[in-house]
Structure formats: C-alpha cells, structure tokens
Image (cartoon, rainbow, N blue to C red):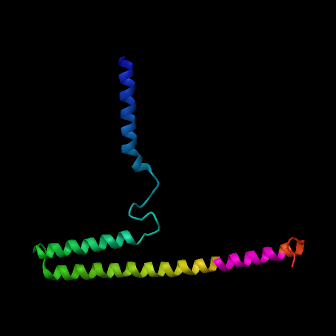
Amino acid sequence: MDYLFLLGGSIVIITCFYFIVAPFFSGEGNTLAAVDGNELELPLEMIYATVNELEMDFLMKKISEDDFQTLKKRYQLLAADYMKMGNKGITDESKSKAEADEIEREILAELNKLRKQKGRIKE
C-alpha cells in the first residue's frame, strides 16, 4: 500500500515539474507576436496602454508636464511607425496574392494546352 502512494506521489511530482520546466525549453520564441498573423496589433495595444498610463501618471502629478509631453510624443511616433509598417505589409500581401493568382492562371492555361495536345479536351 505504501508503494502505491509513493508511485502516485512520484507521478504528481514529475507532472508538476514538467509543467514548470516545459515553457523554458519550448521553441516558440517571442511571446509578444500574435498567433493569427496580427503581429502589429499587440505592440500597438501595448503602446496605447502605455500612453494611457502616462496620462494617468501625469494627472496624478507623478511626472512633470515636460516629461509627459516628451514621452507621449515618442510613443505616438512609435505607434505611427508600427501603423506604417502594417500598411506596407498589407500592400505587400495584396501584391503577393495578385502575383499568386496570376501564376495560378498561367499554370492552368499551360495545363489546358497540354491536355488539348494529348486529346483530352475536345474543342
């Protein structure tokens, strides 16, 4: 009976140890990147949250007005840069999608030519 408790306790301890140590060895890399391809949303949200915290600190008189204006301007420029990168990524993505559609049309045209030559499609 004691062996059963030792075995059960060992399994619980090993399982807990696994869940504690596993995140350190996972190969996921940066945890700030969004999963669904919205890499820019998370940093933008973080920038907006930081600006809100700055405003609260300024209203509570924790920072001076000069520091507040300087930091706010810096974070707003950072957000603008992220938004520009996002727009550039969208245009690049639409270009690559159009190129992929064009390539697919060319492939289908070549396949139709080959089928006509082999007599599979009758005109």
- Kindly indicate the quadrant of the structure image that contains residue 56: bottom left
In reply to whether residue 107 is colored magenta, the answer given is yes
- The answer to whether 11 appears left or right of 48 in the picture is right
Bounds of the magenta segment: 101-113
Q: Nearer the viewer, residue 102 or 60?
A: 102
- In the image, residue 38 sits, relative to residue 19, either above or below, namely below
Q: Going by the picture, which residue comes out furthest to the top? A: 1
Residue 88 image position (x, y, % from top left): 47, 81
Q: Residue at x 11, y 72 (%)?
A: 62
Q: Going by the picture, which residue comes out furthest to the left? A: 61
Q: Residue at x 35, y 82 (%)?
A: 80
- The answer to whether 53 appears left or right of 21 in the picture is left
Q: Residue at x 21, y 71 (%)?
A: 53
- The answer to whether 16 appears left or right of 90 in the picture is left
Q: Nearer the viewer, residue 100 or 29?
A: 100
- In the image, residue 32 sits, relative to residue 93, either above or below, namely above
Counting the numbered discs, the total is 0
Q: Residue at x 43, y 69 (%)?
A: 39
- Kindly indicate the quadrant of the structure image that contains residue 28: bottom left
Residue 34 image position (x, y, % from top left): 42, 65
Residue 17 image position (x, y, % from top left): 37, 39
- Kindly indicate the quadrant of the structure image that contains residue 1: top left
- Could you tell me what secondary structure mostly forms the magenta stretch? helix
Q: Going by the picture, which residue comes out furthest to the front? A: 123
Quadrant of the rendering where the C terminus is positioned: bottom right
In reply to whether residue 54 is colored magenta, the answer given is no
- The answer to whether 103 appears left or right of 119 in the picture is left
Residue 100 image position (x, y, % from top left): 64, 76
